[in-house]
Image (cartoon, helix red, strand yellow):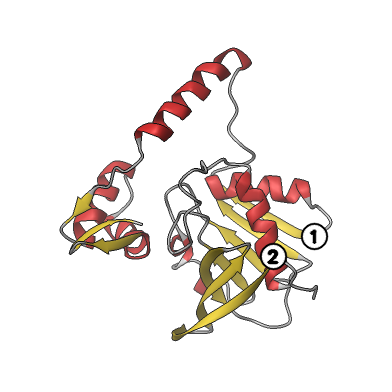
Amino acid sequence: MGSRPYGRAHHRGGRKLNNQDELSLEIGGQVFCGVHWQRSGVVPVIALHGWLDNAATWSRLLPLLDSDEVLALDLAGHGRSDHRPPSVPYHFIDNVGDVIAVADAMGWQRFGLLGHSLGASVATLVAGTVPDRVSRLICIEGFGPLTTAAEKAPRQLAKSIARYHGSAGSVRLYDSVEAAARTRAEATKVSIGAARILCERGTRIENGQVCWS
């Protein structure tokens, strides 16, 4: 195992279930959270969720992979991980550095990657960036970043900038996690059960109501 120059890992008590722990990592002043299925003697795997999802994406699958040690990570601004500073946009490529820093903080010189959708795209670039450190790569519904024709790039950039500035300060509130889950299920066509699992980790209480975290 390597050293931990970029951060410190902390397992949180009171949430242990079948070798599953809540984990927080402080890296460069930012806290990344996740769920750690601890098993010794194997090359660990970092599991990466899709856009607007969180580590709970893997809550039904990972308990079945009883031969692997897995860290299901909340990417920055998702689940229970810290948001980036208000002045910093969420650029896709920044997730690549975050994942490598998380592996460093865990002391994992070698690790596998399991990714879904956005997480699969991030995992692909991590594997291409540090191929000597990645033992295996599993992608579900994603492979590499989305691309667009060169002539469309200026309009896409303008649209992205407008959306970024237009979303500042907007918070949608719900009466309950169940209400948020219904909205998520209708918007993304996932089952209400799956939406509920994601929303339990991806919401917070504000002024007595529920909002996305």
* Circle 1 Cα neighbour tier, 10 Å, few/some/many (<14 / 14–19 / ≥20): some
Q: CA distance from mark 2 to mark 1?
A: 10 Å
Q: Nearer the viewer, residue 172 or 149?
A: 172
Q: Is residue 24 left or right of residue 53?
A: right
**In the image, residue 61 above or below residue 139:** below
> Residue 75 in the image: x percent, y percent?
53, 56
Q: Secondary structure at mark 2?
A: helix
Q: Residue at x 47, y 29 (%)?
A: 160
* Circle 2 Cα neighbour tier, 10 Å, few/some/many (<14 / 14–19 / ≥20): many
**In the image, residue 90 above or below residue 54:** above
Residues at discs 2 and 1 in contact (Cβ within 8 Å): yes
The residue at the far left in this view is 175
| Badge 2 or badge 1: first in the primary sequence | 2
> Residue 178 in the image: x percent, y percent?
21, 60
Quadrant where the N terminus is found in the figure: bottom right
Tag on residue 68? none
Quadrant where the C terminus is found in the figure: bottom left
Q: Residue at x 72, y 76 (%)?
A: 42
Q: Is residue 123 left or right of residue 2?
A: left
Q: Which residue is mark 2?
A: 103
The picture quadrant where one finds residue 206 is: bottom left
> Residue 89 in the image: x percent, y percent?
51, 41
Q: Residue at x 59, y 48 (%)?
A: 120
**In the image, residue 109 above or below residue 16:** above
The residue at the far right in this view is 132
Q: Which residue is mark 1?
A: 133
Mark 2 or 1: in front is 2
Q: Residue at x 56, y 40 (%)?
A: 91
What is the three-letter code of the residue carrying label 2? Ala
